[in-house]
Amino acid sequence: MHSNSSQPTVAIAGGGLAGLAAACALSDAGFRVALYEKRPFLGGRASSYEHPGTGEVVDNCQHVLFRVCTNLVEFYQRIGVGDQIRWFDQMNFIEPGGRISVMKSSFLPAPLHTAPSFLHFPFLTGADKLAIARALVPLTLAAQRDNGQSFRHWLDQHGQTTNAIHRFWRPILVSALSEELDRISISAAAQVVRESMRSPQARQMGVPKIPLTDLYNAAGDYVRARGGDIHFRCSLESFITDEKSVQLRVADSEQTFDYLVASLPFDALARVLPEAPESVGLRGKIKHFETSPITGIHLWFDRQISNLDHAVLLDRTIQWMFHKSRLQPMRMQESLTLAMNVRSGHAREQYESTHAVKGADSETTRATEGGSYIELVVSSSKSLIDKSRSEIVEVALGEVREFFPAAREANLVKSAVIKEVNATYSPRPGIEAHRPGTVTSWPRVFLAGDWTATGWPATMEGAVRSGYLAAEAVVRSAGRNARFLSPDMPARGLMRFFP
């Protein structure tokens, strides 16, 4: 697929968010795009599939966004699915026993807009709140550097109480960064806090109203509509370059392109790098990266267990509950259609699954029509990796019945456990120095991925930013200029007076 004089060609290796963002941007810039994805669907770690044990279409893990994620929001608008995101200003915190506390914005200017809610949190003492407020001042008003120490060390230095750490800092940051506080860098934690305080709108949370693969199929359609190609079950095996082109070996065939964007996880990239001196520096950076797991637990009940759409769960293994039957009220036919579109055998190879012992067709029908389907998320789920499906479901079911009293009378119809063992890179202290930029030692090869130097941690926003940065670099290499990266959300209120 070499270029003609009017339309340069670019190969995108990897159909996750980073690769899709780069593909869509470069398609708009007049490049002929060929995207190669080793799996039979788009979205990478943010995807859906028909679960073989339940027959249900499930997301591999619940993904959310926030208004402060300006590039991700723009990407959804670009591909025409911006209206498929449901936005929430309210965040619910639940204690074992069922007591609910609500965080929402007030009339106060940023960064004080959530202060009234925070001050009324019954699960924090006055001493907890005072300690948290003292720590929020430096985190909100000044950028924090990665000095090699963990954020847990920083919290201890800043006089945080045990209760504040376990009931405030840990739920927020472990969910955001998928790592424990003693393995999170100060700069990564501080960015999460600072960005959420930028304006009252920054912390509004968006949840997709449709399965994730539906979102990213729209990106594939976007590329095809502009003359590009999407190749499934095709993975990049190796590449070599010269002054004028890049030669790829993909699925036992050789292809030639003007440019390559490698939007692969760091471990996958290491496997395809040439055995050449140009690879030494990048291989050295990759060696510093580790991954962190996320586990999604899907439970179907025969009756409603809560009227909440989502909630943060305190003091237990589970960190989040998403009420999928409320968030994604798909008609049965829509669900079946999606199942046909995303059906593949990969799930059996990667994930544990179950069909509950109690679960006749009549029970399944009741669960679909009048029951609750919830997804539970455990970030940094190292303690669950070696547990069996039945052990994880037993833990989850016990905790759900602690938080939601109505679940104690509900029957579990079916369940599924999805372990994403290598979900994100670990934002450990010192890792920022090893995140590579998009430009490589090969003039026609560029990198994308949430683990690259995006200025953001391992988030969907970071992935899209990396794709746009790579697309800008490709366009510059072709002798033109383009700007795909969206500006940051403007600071509001008192935050306007701080750098």
Image: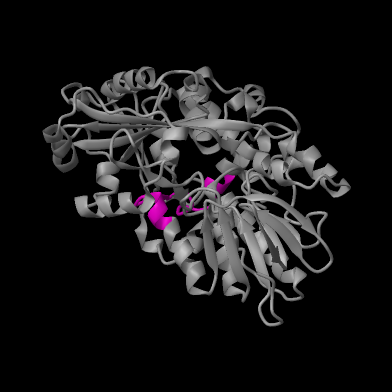
Instruction: Decide whether residue 409 is among the magenta residues.
Output: no
**Image: 239 above or below 90:** below
Q: Quadrant of the N terminus?
A: bottom right
Would you identify the image quadrant in which residue 268 lies? top right
Judging depth in this view, the residue of 403 and 465 nearest the camera is 465
In the picture as drawn, the residue positioned furthest to the right comes out as 277
Judging depth in this view, the residue of 339 and 30 nearest the camera is 339
For image coordinates 66% across by 32% down, the residue present is: 290
Judging depth in this view, the residue of 167 and 428 nearest the camera is 428
Q: Position of residue 182 (x, y in %)?
A: 63, 24
Would you identify the image quadrant in which residue 484 lies? bottom right
**Image: 71 above or below 29:** above
For image coordinates 61% across by 33% down, the residue present is: 291
Q: Which residues are magenta?
A: 194-215
Q: Is residue 308 visible?
A: yes
Q: Position of residue 444 (x, y in %)?
A: 77, 62
Instruction: Decide whether residue 201 is among the magenta residues.
Output: yes
Q: Position of residue 21 (x, y in %)?
A: 56, 60
Instruction: Classify residue 306 as left or right of residue 448.
Output: left
Instruction: Classify residue 215 as left or right of residue 380.
Output: left
Q: Is residue 262 visible?
A: no
